[in-house]
């Protein structure tokens, strides 16, 4: 994923560097790279990630509602379609390899970390505009691309006989890297219309909180906390 150093995403990431490093270098991520993550922890994470995707679709539906710009509206609706009709199906198919089916995942109670981040994203969008909403989404959408690319490029990452190698390859792959790069570009397009110098600090707070909540999501998977 190529980023320009003056992108809004890069500026936000720099503004909360310590939190960003704690998220992207979390123990859950390090154990994925080493292949040492307990499989029960990964299954728990996958089940919660299914519930997470449902709320992500709601967030993009909210993005369509929050704008009167037809191009933005079409992009948001395309994201809803992609999550509900493509990404969810791929996630379900992937989870089947881990003995998880859709019926079982749909019946799972939401973990507190799942509720915290998804509701934060929705609240950010409802209280603000689409720039606030996409800023709250960025640590997940763009962050997973950065994590996948970093793990794939790191010679210390174990790929042979690593049960999580396919997860790493998925987020390091060209298809997801394109999604992440598109999210970086979307933030910049919105910034051109809505960002003022006075507003940056508020966006950085949103980004920092979302990053912290993403780290909590990893921790939830690691400890299998309800």
Image (tube, helix red, strand yellow):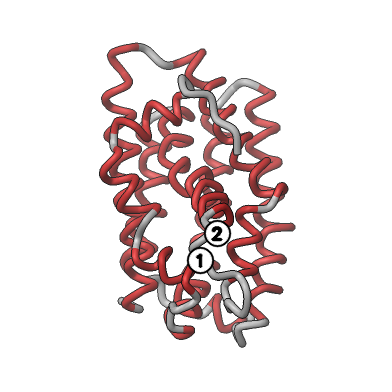
> Label 2's element?
helix
Q: Which residue is mark 1?
A: 49
In this rendered view, identify the residue nearer to me: 147 or 222.
147
Q: Does residue 149 appear left or right of residue 21 in this picture?
A: right
Q: Which residue is mark 2?
A: 53
Q: Can residue 140 be seen at all in this image of the molecule?
A: yes
Asked if 107 appears above or below 54 in the picture, the reply is: below
The N terminus lies in quadrant = top right
Q: Can residue 226 be seen at all in this image of the molecule?
A: no
Instruction: Give the residue drawn at x 71%, y 66%.
Output: 89
Q: Residues within 10 Å of mark 2 (few under 14, many from 20)?
A: some
Q: Position of residue 207 (x, y in %)?
A: 35, 38
Q: Does residue 87 appear left or right of residue 68 in this picture?
A: right
Q: Position of residue 174 (x, y in %)?
A: 71, 47
Q: Does residue 58 appear left or right of residue 226 in this picture?
A: right
Q: Are marks 1 and 2 in contact (CB under 8 Å)?
A: yes
């Amino acid at each position: 994923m190529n980023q320009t150093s003056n992108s809004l995403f890069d500026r936000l990431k720099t503004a909360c560097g310590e939190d960003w490093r704690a998220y992207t270098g979390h123990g859950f991520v390090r154990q994925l790279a080493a292949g040492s993550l307990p499989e029960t922890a990964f299954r728990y994470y996958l089940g919660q990630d299914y519930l997470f995707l449902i709320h992500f679709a709601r967030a993009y539906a909210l993005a369509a509602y929050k704008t009167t710009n037809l191009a933005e509206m079409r992009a948001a609706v395309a994201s809803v379609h992609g999550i509900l009709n493509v990404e969810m199906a791929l996630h379900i198919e992937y989870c089947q390899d881990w003995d998880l089916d859709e019926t079982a995942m749909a019946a799972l109670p939401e973990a507190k970390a799942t509720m915290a981040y998804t509701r934060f994203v929705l609240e950010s969008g409802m209280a603000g505009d689409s720039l606030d909403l996409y800023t709250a989404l960025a640590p997940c959408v763009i962050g997973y691309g950065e994590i996948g690319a970093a793990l794939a490029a790191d010679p210390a990452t174990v790929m042979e006989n690593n049960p999580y190698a396919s997860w790493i390859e998925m987020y390091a792959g060209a298809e997801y890297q394109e999604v992440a790069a598109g999210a970086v570009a979307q933030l910049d397009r919105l910034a051109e219309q809505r960002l003022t110098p006075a507003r940056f600090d508020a966006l950085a707070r949103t980004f920092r909180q979302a990053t912290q909540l993403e780290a909590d999501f990893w921790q939830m998977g690691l400890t299998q906390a309800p």
